[in-house]
Amino acid sequence: MKVIFLDIDGVLQPYGSRERFEHDWQVLKNEMSEKYNRDYSIYDPADIGACYYDWDKDAVDRIKRILKETGAKIVISSDWRSERLQDKMKDLLRIWDMEQYWVGETNIIWHEEQVAEKEILTYIETKANGSHWSYRELEILYYIYKHPEVTNYVAIDDMDLSRTLEAHFVKTHNLINDEQTEKCIEILNDKNLEIQRAV
């Protein structure tokens, strides 16, 4: 399985976008619940409004193109994740007809003690080679470690994750663009970048 580790802000939602504040979120929640036969009232109305009004259509279309041309699935690595509401991101992706690509989210890790497998910490520290690494990098590597079905991946993020993800990382600024889209497709379809796991 190929995976896109997807951030939201700075990838799909541009910095400073605030169109959602010009609309009635309660009306939108009711419309979404009726349209998709799902209870959207359990989610933060600001998240629903941001997804519906502030996600950039061209950026969403670029992610869809990556998915279609590579056969990849989506794993959410963004701060939009929710440990309490496990289906939130799937239901938000449904608004843009992408729920069928969603396979899960990275674990939210705030402290190294949350990682049971110490070899992951050793691995990321070796990759970082003494430089600072983010917990998002650890969360992504931990997901890959726990999911042997992942054969290749790309992380799309406006945060620098290159210290440990190296050739599997594409950095955006504000929104994913055409050049970055091509790079993601290239990474996911590159046989030489497939994950080599110990037998």
Image (spheres, rainbow, N blue to C red):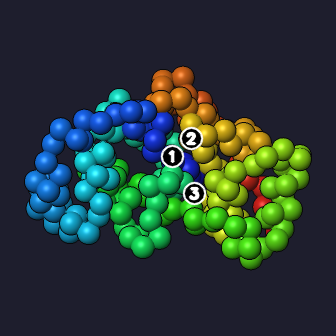
Q: Identify the residue shown where x is 30% and y is 45%.
A: 50
Q: Mark 1 and mark 2: span between their CA atoms?
A: 5 Å
Residue 168 location (% of width, % of height): 68, 42
Query: Is 87 placed left or right of 195 in the picture?
Result: left
Nearer to the camera, 194 or 32: 32
Residue 90: name its quadrant: bottom left
Q: Identify the residue shown where x is 56% and y is 41%.
A: 156
Q: Is residue 113 above or below residue 135?
A: below
Q: Residue 193 carries which label?
A: none
Q: Mark 3 points at which residue?
A: 1
Q: Mark 1 points at which residue?
A: 7
Dot 2 surroundings within 10 Å: few (below 14), some, or many (20 or more)?
many
Q: Identify the residue shown where x is 16% and y is 66%.
A: 37
Q: Name the residue under label 2.
A: 157
Residue situated furthest top in the rendering: 179
Query: Is 19 placed left or right of 102 in the picture?
Result: left
The disc, 1 or 2, on the residue closer to the chain's N-terminal end is 1
SS assignment at label 1: loop
